[in-house]
Amino acid sequence: MSQDWTTDPDPARMRFGTETFYAAVGRAFVAMCAVVPVLFAIEALDYWLHLGLDPRGGIIPRSVYGLDGIVFSPLLHDGFDHLYGNSVPLILLGTFVLAAGSRRFIWSTAFIMLVSGLGVWITGPPNTVVVGASGVIFGYFGLLLARGIVERTWWNLGVVVLVGLLYWWQLFGILPSDPHVSWQGHLFGFLGGAVAAILFRR
C-alpha cells in the first residue's frame, strides 16, 4: 500500500538530500508563501473599508466576547508594520513544520492556537485587544526545538540548529518587556508548540 508523502511523509523517504525531502520542503515553502498574501488582504480590507476587525476578532482577556479571538486573532494584525514583522518568521518556521506532513501541521497549528489563545484570554491584561500571528510563530519555534529532541533525527536536529541561530534572541519575547507586546501569547504559544511536538510526534 503506497503512502501519500504530502500528508504524512515516510521518515525513510524524507532523509536529507532525497528527492522526496526537497519536494516536501519546496511545496511547504510555496504553501506558506501563499498564506502571507491572505493575511495582507485581510489587513488591507480592514484598513480601506474601516471594518474594525481587530476589536471584533481579537482576544479580549476574560471577556466572553473575546473568546472567538482564539480562532480569529492570528489572522489579524495591528497595522502593516506588525504584519511585515511576522511574515518572514511565519514563512520560514511554518515551512519546516509543514514539511513534516500536512496532517501534523494542521493538528499542531490548531493546538498551538488553542493553548496560546487561552493563555492570553486567562492571563492577559484586562480591557485590551490582542491580535497577531506571533503566538503561532512562537509555537512553531517551540515545536521545532522540541521535535529535534523528541524525534532525534538528523533532519530535525539540523532544523533546530538553523532556527536557534536565526531566532535565539526571539526567546526573550516570552518575558514581560514591551507593554504593547503580548508576551503571554508568546510564552503560551511556545509551550503549546513544545507539547504539540510530543503529542503529534512520529
Image: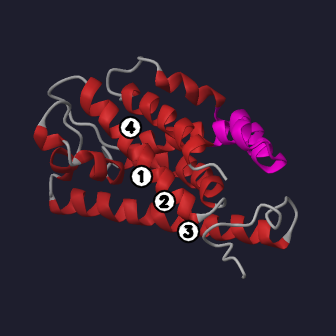
Q: Which residue is mark 2?
A: 106
Q: Secondary structure at mark 2?
A: helix
The answer to whether 103 is drawn above or below residue 143 in the figure is: below
The quadrant of the rendering that contains the N terminus is bottom right
Whole-number angstrom distance, CA of label 4 to CA of label 2? 15 Å
Whole-number angstrom distance, CA of label 4 to CA of label 3? 23 Å
Q: Which residue is mark 4?
A: 116
The amino acid beneath tag 2 is Ile
- Image quadrant in which you'd find residue 124: top left
Q: Position of residue 75 (x, y in %)?
A: 34, 54
Residue 81 visible, this angle: no
Q: Is residue 146 left or right of residue 174?
A: right
Residue sitting at the far right: 17
The answer to whether 16 is drawn above or below residue 139 in the figure is: below
108 and 159: which is toward the camera: 108
Q: Position of residue 142 (x, y in %)?
A: 58, 36
Pair 3/2: label in front = 2
